[in-house]
Amino acid sequence: MNAHSTTNIFKQAAGASIGWGIVMVLLGVLALFLPLATGIGVSIAVSWIIVFSGIAYVASAFAARGAGSFLWRLLIGAVYILGGLYLAFNPGLALESLTLAMAVMFFIEGVLETVMFFQFRTLPGSGWVLFNGIVTLFLAYLIWRPWPGSSIWAIGTILGINLIMSGFTRLMYSVAARRTLEAVS
């Protein structure tokens, strides 16, 4: 393989990455305009992941060596399957649960980031850790305070922002890579 064909392969990969970046930005914008639908979609997907995890538990029960282990895995699998199905067919409840879990997760992350800042405050750039901790605590508060009402917008909005940021980042570094490859060839 010569250098020219290798450069062409990398240009094609950069072009595909640019395309994916654009798709991610568009999906992010769609999620921002439809945060409730996005949140419901995410909660249904997570519910079915729980169901399939339960199926995997049940399947693993048949590999158990003893009756106790078999029964334990079977029971855990049944709980996952029943719980996942309940959430899948009650997506509003699943969305509320996920939203509360996200608020708790952000709160814990914010506290840990703030504590970490005090551990590393003498290092250059450590102020960004504190900033991230404070912003994350603020996000936790914004989600938790009006909960369950925040379920309508929180997951869809945060996913939308994440998709836009990730897509834009992918787009920018892919365009830069493509320009670099064109300058080299």
Image (cartoon, rainbow, N blue to C red):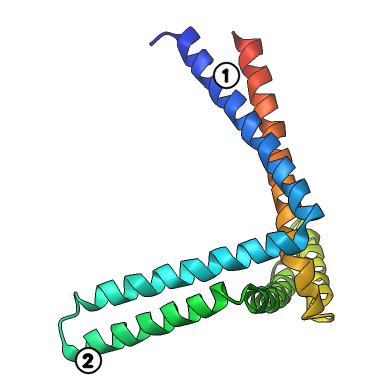
State which tag comes first along the sequence, 1 or 2: 1
Q: Residue at x 23, y 85 (%)?
A: 70
52 relative position to 88: left or right: left
Q: Residues within 10 Å of mark 2 (few under 14, many from 20)?
A: few
Please tell me whether residue 89 is drawn above or below residue 160 in the rendered image.
below
Label 1: which secondary element: helix
Find the residue positioned furthest to the left.
Answer: 65
Q: Residue at x 42, y 8 (%)?
A: 2
Find the residue positioned furthest to the front.
Answer: 89
Please tell me whether residue 95 is drawn above or below residue 166 in the rendered image.
below
Amino acid found under the numbered disc labelled 1: Lys
Residue 73 point in image, percent of width and height: 30, 83
Q: Nearer the viewer, mark 1 or mark 2?
A: 2
Q: CA distance from mark 1 to mark 2?
A: 57 Å
For residue 122, what is the image quadrant? bottom right
Please tell me whether residue 71 is drawn above or below residue 49 in the rendered image.
below
Q: Nearer the viewer, residue 44 or 73?
A: 44
Q: Are marks 1 and 2 in contact (CB under 8 Å)?
A: no
7 relative position to 182: left or right: left
Amino acid found under the numbered disc labelled 2: Gly
For residue 52, what is the image quadrant? bottom left
Judging by the rendered image, the residue that carries numbered circle 2 is 68
Residue 11, numbered label: 1
The quadrant in which the C terminus is found is top right
Q: Nearer the viewer, residue 54 or 108?
A: 54
Q: Residue at x 79, y 81 (%)?
A: 147
Residue 137 visible somewhere in the drawing: no
Number of on-image labels: 2
The quadrant in which the N terminus is found is top left
Q: Residues within 10 Å of mark 1 (few under 14, many from 20)?
A: many
